[in-house]
């Protein structure tokens, strides 16, 4: 029961919350660009409309990968919100990512393919920092279980300032926000058409959207971990980070993969590894 | 219990008999059946040994009256060394020659100085770690032998060379015998003997094709491994002179400070054997050998002998500067070779680098030497042996079908060789995707390292994201759907299918059964050596089983989805030749600006500029040589 209730709650509520956040994102982005922007519920209308559209395919295997991507994204969130092992949660989200990439590869379409390659580079770029976040959390709480991290008495952030900065940096990659939205983007007129999503339509494309809602809620959950000792502060800080990501998205122009890879590994080494090293020294001296 | 010793004897001597048989039998099909039958018997005997020893907590020790056996070993050692000296004079390989002469000198010195040492109290020892080695050699090794029957028949035709498969199988069976001996030996002089035999078999098998590069690479492997053998011999000698001991089980009970020099010398031999930086070049060169050789010697068993020895010694290295240095050598090897693997187009080279990197991870764990890291190291050994041999064999089969080892020629392989590709996908998933074997081990490695020393986990953090990259992009190439496609797997023989499907099944099986493997095989060994148990928590095991079930549902969906969907060809910005899938027979084509027609080609990233072999290899060489100097430095300080 202790596992079942949060699992069901996540599966039911996450897409609602994720869709609403996406609606807010679009309104805020519009206001930043001096537009009125769509209705708050527009993301839901979009998905419902996509569900009704014809599902045109390039080959019969491509949709299977999208379903797997969705299933593993949901599974990742379930692991997270039921308080499971943090490393296992990270690996599960990697599996979801691998399915996404394979879906793009399977179409043998130039645009999907480039999107997949870039998505894969993004995964290679952000994974070290994400795992370092998990290492840092363990060093503070002495447990790999997310439930223990949430129950930890004082704000984890104070022990992990470097890791927090580094993690927010790679969160931009994870949320596919500019300047790191290499693999696919909501914005029109880009060089890779729609990236990974180019060959997906109708229901499959709707699944992509829903998967991203689930993913965003999971990612915001990881931000919450840094502030979990005080739920009020936690929620406010998490939303503030989301707002920050929206601002970055609107301010920055897309970078090339070289800069993406080098900068995120550099951040992982400078902010993440140094933070862990300091914790290590504090513990053993 | 009284069956155990005869089975151990059978495992060592029976392959030797088969070796002689292989040289004698001239008829190819009789030889094929003999190989299959012997492989089956060897596998059955290894499993029987497991059944007899099931749940045994205490190791089994035997004192063998060494009389005649000892003399035979001495003579065999001398003959091997003399042969190497003769061969290196013939082929004008003077580096190898001088090392072989030094080795002969060391050997004779040891024989004289250790004369009258008496009998070992325990010559053969069977505990769960040796049991795991026996199962790997017995089961995986036998499967590879069965595969080789079908493979080698085509090999000579493909490479346009004379059929010398009698020699090939003789060397393989001699090797299997030596590996069993190596796993059982507790007397270090015996262990060294079997160690040298595996080196010699590897030398013969690498040079099998007798092309110029094969000869050159075989001598490189030989030279490095002789250097390792010399260190091994000196280690035994120093140990005996200082402590009067020449058994492995006694060595690890001595005070670490007193035996650090011999332990480091033995570990050096282990580092060479498992191709750690700066010695990795011999393993990369060894890839010129026929694929079954790469699968058996150079990924699943022989190179594991090196890490096996280091794992055995690791209680001595726990919390010592030498242990930390060994861990760093492993860490550097793991990280850099994973990165180099990104830049490899040739899939055998990629697999070679990934093998080196996994061995590096095992060395990293063994150097740290806490009970959790050792648990992980053993787990890695098992998973890697099975999944990697599957990958090598499948890749060998692919090569015979498409005449290429280049990943770029493997576009849409799933349509051309569906069954082989399925084996490849299982093998690749086994190497890096949760919840399959290697990922379980990498995860365990991370947790164990974070607990022991978080700074060492950085190697794993960066190395495993490189692993993710190069395996996924290869996987992507395989699963592309590109029409029209032509079936290319008609050449695969029944033996080969048998082995590949067995290994695929085994890869899946050990993922599901790994909690059992852990608690019945690995944990008792850890308990015995460290008096502490290591296991994964049950809730995590359940989560992984759920993940496995989710992944296995994937193929089901293909059958479940409705077939009435409109199919179009991929979007090409309106420049495509035709829109309609039905009347579209040729490859995916588009109009160029000059109004010519061009076919779409998709090429992966390899990042040679960032992760090229030359650049990173040099860095690895410098780092590892410095670390080796430190390793011997800290012993003398």
Image (cartoon, coloured by chain):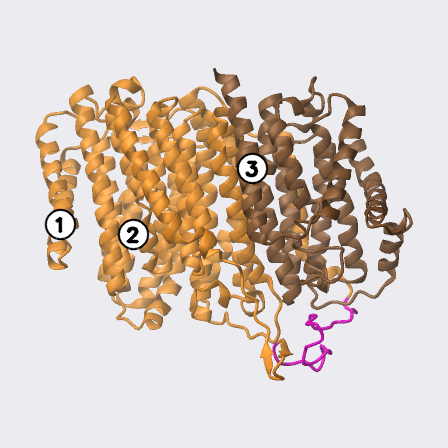
Chain colours: A brown, B orange
In the figure, is residue B284 to the left or right of A97?
left
Point out the tag, 2 or 1, that comes first from the N-terminus.
1
Q: Which residue is mark 2?
A: B173
Question: What whole-number distance in Å separates the C-alpha atoms at marks 3 and 1?
Answer: 48 Å
| Residue toward you, B337 or B394 | B337
In magenta stretch: residue B527: no
Please provide the residue range marked out in magenta: B563-587
Q: Residue B176: tell me if it is visible.
A: yes
Question: What whole-number distance in Å separates the C-alpha atoms at marks 2 and 1?
Answer: 27 Å
Q: Residue B544: tell me if it is visible.
A: no
Q: What residue sits 54% from the left and 22% below the top?
A: A279
Instruction: Give the vertical position of B29 relative to B629 (above or below).
Output: below
Picture quadrant where residue B241 is located = top left
Point out the residue furthest to the bottom here. Answer: B595
| Residue toward you, A276 or A61 | A276
Percent position of residue B536, x then y: 56, 30
Q: Which residue is mark 1?
A: B97
Answer few, some or many: residues within 10 Å of disc 2's Cα (few below 14, many 20 plus, some between 14 and 19).
Answer: many
Picture quadrant where residue B412 is located = bottom right
Query: On what subunit does the disc labeled 1 rest?
Result: B
Query: On what subunit does the disc labeled 3 rest?
Result: A
Quarter of the image that includes the C terminus of chain B: top left
Percent position of residue B25, x then y: 25, 63
Percent position of residue B83, x then y: 13, 52
Q: How many marks?
A: 3
Query: On what subunit does the disc labeled 2 rest?
Result: B
Secondary structure of the residue carrying tag 2 is helix
Question: What whole-number distance in Å separates the C-alpha atoms at marks 3 and 2?
Answer: 49 Å
**Discs 2, 1: same chain:** yes
Secondary structure of the residue carrying tag 1 is helix
Q: Main secondary structure of the magenta part?
A: loop
Q: Which residue is mark 3?
A: A268
């Amino acid at each position: 029961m202790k596992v079942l209730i949060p699992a069901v709650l996540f599966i039911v509520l996450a897409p609602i919350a994720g869709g609403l956040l996406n609606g807010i994102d679009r309104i805020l982005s519009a206001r930043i660009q001096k537009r009125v922007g769509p209705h708050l519920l527009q993301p839901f209308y979009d998905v419902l409309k996509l569900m009704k559209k014809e599902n045109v395919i390039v080959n019969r295997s491509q949709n299977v990968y999208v379903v797997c991507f969705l299933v593993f994204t949901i599974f990742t969130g379930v692991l997270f919100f039921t308080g499971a092992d943090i490393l296992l949660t990270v690996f599960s989200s990697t599996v979801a990512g691998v399915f996404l990439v394979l879906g793009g590869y399977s179409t043998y379409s130039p645009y999907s393919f480039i999107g997949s390659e870039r998505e894969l580079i993004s995964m290679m770029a952000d994974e070290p920092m994400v795992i370092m976040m998990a290492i840092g959390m363990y060093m503070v709480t002495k447990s790999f279980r997310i439930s223990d991290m949430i129950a930890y008495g004082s704000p984890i952030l104070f022990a992990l300032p470097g890791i927090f900065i580094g993690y927010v940096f790679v969160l931009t990659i994870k949320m596919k926000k500019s300047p790191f939205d290499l693999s696919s983007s909501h914005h029109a007129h880009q060089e890779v058409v729609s990236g990974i999503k180019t060959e997906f339509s109708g229901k499959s494309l709707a699944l992509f959207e829903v998967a991203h809602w689930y993913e965003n809620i999971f990612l915001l959950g990881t931000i919450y971990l840094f502030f979990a000792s005080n739920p009020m502060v936690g929620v406010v800080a998490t939303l503030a980070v989301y707002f920050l990501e929206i601002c970055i998205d609107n301010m920055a122009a897309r970078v090339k993969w070289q800069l993406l890879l080098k900068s995120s590994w550099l951040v992982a080494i400078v902010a993440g590894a140094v933070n862990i090293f300091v914790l290590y020294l504090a513990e053993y001296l | 219990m009284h069956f155990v010793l005869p089975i151990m004897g059978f495992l060592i001597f029976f392959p030797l008999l088969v070796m002689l048989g292989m040289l004698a039998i001239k008829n190819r099909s009789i030889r094929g059946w003999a190989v299959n039958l012997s492989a089956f018997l060897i596998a059955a005997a290894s499993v029987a040994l497991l059944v007899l020893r099931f749940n045994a907590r205490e190791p089994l020790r035997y004192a063998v009256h060494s009389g005649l056996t000892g003399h035979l070993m001495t003579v065999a050692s001398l003959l091997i060394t003399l042969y190497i000296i003769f061969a290196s004079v013939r082929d004008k390989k003077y580096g190898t020659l001088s090392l072989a002469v030094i080795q002969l000198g060391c050997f004779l010195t040891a024989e004289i100085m250790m004369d009258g040492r008496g009998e070992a109290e325990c010559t053969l020892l069977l505990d769960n770690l040796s049991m795991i080695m026996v199962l790997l050699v017995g089961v995986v090794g036998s499967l590879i032998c069965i595969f080789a029957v079908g493979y080698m028949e085509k090999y000579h035709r493909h490479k346009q060379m004379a059929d010398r498969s009698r020699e090939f199988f003789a060397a393989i069976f001699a090797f299997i015998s030596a590996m069993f001996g190596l796993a059982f030996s507790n007397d270090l002089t015996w262990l060294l003997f079997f160690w040298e035999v595996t080196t010699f078999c590897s030398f013969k098998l690498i040079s099998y094709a007798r092309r110029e590069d094969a000869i050159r690479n075989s001598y490189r492997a030989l030279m490095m491994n002789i250097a390792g053998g010399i260190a091994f011999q000196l280690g035994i000698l120093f140990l005996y002179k200082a402590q009067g001991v020449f058994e492995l089980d006694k060595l690890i009970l001595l005070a670490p400070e007193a035996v650090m020099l011999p332990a480091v010398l033995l570990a050096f031999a282990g580092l060479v054997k498992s191709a750690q930086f700066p010695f990795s070049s011999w393993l990369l060169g060894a890839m010129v050998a026929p694929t079954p050789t790469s699968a058996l010697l150079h990924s699943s068993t022989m190179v594991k002998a090196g890490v096996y020895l280091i794992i055995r010694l690791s209680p001595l290295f726990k919390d010592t500067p030498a242990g930390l240095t060994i861990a760093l050598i492993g860490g550097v090897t793991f990280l850099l070779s994973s990165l180099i693997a990104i830049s490899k187009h040739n899939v055998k080279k990629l697999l070679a680098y990934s093998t080196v990197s996994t061995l590096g991870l095992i060395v990293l764990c063994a150097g740290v030497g806490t009970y959790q890291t050792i648990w992980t190291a053993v787990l890695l050994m098992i998973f890697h042996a099975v999944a990697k041999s599957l990958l090598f064999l499948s890749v060998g089969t692919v090569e015979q079908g498409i005449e290429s080892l280049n990943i770029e020629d493997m576009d849409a392989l799933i349509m051309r060789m569906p069954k082989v590709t399925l084996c490849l996908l299982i093998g690749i998933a086994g190497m890096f995707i949760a919840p399959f074997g290697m990922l379980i081990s990498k995860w365990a490695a991370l947790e164990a390292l974070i607990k022991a020393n978080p700074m060492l986990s950085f190697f794993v953090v960066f190395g495993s994201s490189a692993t993710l990259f190069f395996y996924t992009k290869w996987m992507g190439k395989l699963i592309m759907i590109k029409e029209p496609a032509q079936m290319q797997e008609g050449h695969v023989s029944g033996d080969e299918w048998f082995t590949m499907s067995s290994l695929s099944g085994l890869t899946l099986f050990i993922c599901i059964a790994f909690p059992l493997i852990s608690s019945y095989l690995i944990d008792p060994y850890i308990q015995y050596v460290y008096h502490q148990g290591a296991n994964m928590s049950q809730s995590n095991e359940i989560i992984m089983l759920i993940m496995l079930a989710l992944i296995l549902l994937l193929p089901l969906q293909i059958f479940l989805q409705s077939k009435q969907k409109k199919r179009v060809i991929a979007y090409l910005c309106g420049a495509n030749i035709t829109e309609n899938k039905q009347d579209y027979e040729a490859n995916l084509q588009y109009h160029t600006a000059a109004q010519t027609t061009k076919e779409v080609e998709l090429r992966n990233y390899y990042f040679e500029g960032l992760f090229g072999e030359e650049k990173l290899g040099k860095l690895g060489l410098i780092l590892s040589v410095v670390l080796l100097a430190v390793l011997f430095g800290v012993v003398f300080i």
